[in-house]
Structures are given as structure tokens and as C-alpha cells.
Amino acid sequence: MMWNWLRRRRNDPETPDMITCQEALARVYEYLDGELGPAWTEKVRHHIETCRRCWPRFELERAFLDHIREQGLPSVRARGLKERIQTLLDEVDPD
Amino acid sequence: MTDVDRDLKRAQFEAEALVHLDDLYGLALRLTAGDEPWAEDLVQTTCLRAYQRWSQYEVGTNCRAWLMTILRSTFINEYHAGRKQPTPVDYDEVGEWSVFEDRSPEDPEARFFERVVDERIVAALDALPDDFRLPLVLSDLQGLKYREIAESLGVPVGTVKSRLFRARRQLQRDLYDYARDAGLVS
């Protein structure tokens, strides 16, 4: 019974092939980076939308990356750097 | 070039480009893992190159992004020229384990990283081995695609993918260890 149902689902063009949690989690960053091809993107998207275990894991990974993006690149003032660069520029012509 | 031309271009360069100096230095520091003299050198070279190619820049377009592109390629060239050799990484040591497996997603402490101050995040980034740090900086802090990172580091896309995976897991673990040691999470 179960197998027939599964097979039907797999053959249904509306339902992407089902993948395991392990297969989904192995691709978490490629998915979040938008680097998976369309077929795998669809499989992973479908998996996390229906998997209670994976969905929060993906959200945590996404939040972690967002946090690194926000905090990881502070601008920094280097003392005297602007003046040194201005002196350098005095010596050359702009193109 | 007349003096008027030169003064005009110089004023334009100061207004459009030199305003981004602190952002450029911030990026140079992350690329060089906090090497201040090298980072300052990179910013100087970048500004000089940009000034000498100023006619290629279209006023009003994203000058900051243009300058960052010049800085990245300057860095990559110097890096490959052997100014700094990457420290070898023991890949097995890093593994693929995620610290999030330790925490139930409902646990507010699962978002431990939000309690860590920015200086610690920057320090943890700088402490990553070059093979991990550079793909991570280029991807997460510069928004480059895997293919672009592969081209600039001269490695296959598959290598970028696996290094980025391990870099992020390593960073999670370092920040998690720090958060626990500092008593930010139990």
C-alpha cells in the first residue's frame, strides 16, 4: 500500500522527487546561496517546507549567515591613511 | 591635461571615491586577516589605481563596489605572488558537524551567535585558516558567486563549495565555544 502510494507520488509530475533529511542538509548552504540548480532547489524547497526537523535547522543556518553578513565587515578608520593617500595622488595625474 | 581639468577630476575623486576609505580599509583588514600594514598598502594601491583609471568610472554608478573590485583583485594578485602562504588545514579535524544539532530550535540559545559582540565575530573570522577564510569573506562579506570565487582563488567550484561549507561550520563552532566559555549560553 505504502509503496504504491510512494511510487505514485514520485511519478506525479506535480510532486518533486522526495529526498531524505541528510540529502537536504548536505545542500543547506548551496540552497541558501542560490547555487543549486532548479531541479535540486525544488527538491530541497519541497523537503524543508514539509519536514518539521529540517525547516528550523535551515532557518538557523540562514539567521547565522545573515548575522555574519551584518557584523563581519565593519568599516575601520586608519589614522593618517587619507592624508597619505592624498599626498600620493598629488604626485600623479588622473586618467 | 590642464590644471583646471586636473583639479576638477581630483575634487570629483575625493567626493566620489575617498569617502569610502573606511569601508575599503575594513575589507582590506578582513582579506589580510587583520594585517594592518598590508591592509593600508592595499587601500593605497587601490586608490592610486582607481585615480589613474578614473575616466573608466561612470559618475553616479556604484563607486564603492568598483573600488572594492579593484581592492579584491589587487589583494588576490599579491596573495598569489606569495606574500603570504596559506597555513595547511586538517580537513578531517573540522568535520561537518553543526553546532545547531546541540540545540533544539525552540531553545532561544540556539541563536547564541546573536549574543556574541561584533569584535569577537571579526576575530573569529580572522582566525580561520586562509583556505576557509577567503572563500567565506568573498562569499558572505562580498556576495560573490561560487564561480567567481573559484576564478579568483584559482580552484575548482567544487573546492569552493566544500571549503565554504567547512568554513561556516568551523566559524559556528568557534563562536559557540566562545559563547559557552564566556557564559553567554549554558
Image: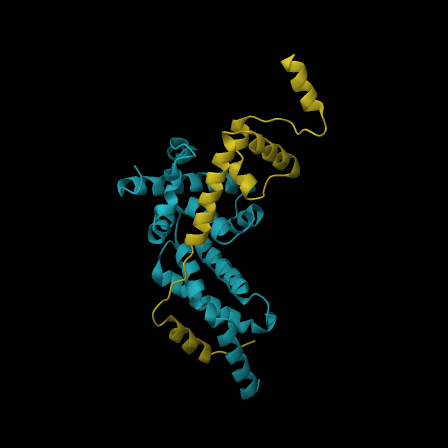
Chain colours: A yellow, B cyan
Residue for point 52% across, 72% down = B16
Is residue A93 in view? no
Is residue A69 in view? yes
**Horizontal relation, residue B81 to residue B120: left or right:** right
**Where, quadrant-wise, is the C terminus of chain B in this rendering?**
top left
Position above or below: A77 against B110:
below
* Residue B21 image-quadrant placement: bottom left
**Where, quadrant-wise, is the N terminus of chain B in this rendering?**
bottom right
* Residue B131 image-quadrant placement: top left
Position above or below: B24 against A34:
below
Query: Residue B61 in the image: x percent, y percent?
Result: 59, 67
Query: Residue B153 in the image: x percent, y percent?
Result: 50, 49
Residue for point 35% across, 40% down = B176
**Horizontal relation, residue B152 to residue B86: left or right:** right
Position above or below: B178 against B76:
above
Residue for point 38% across, 75% down = A83
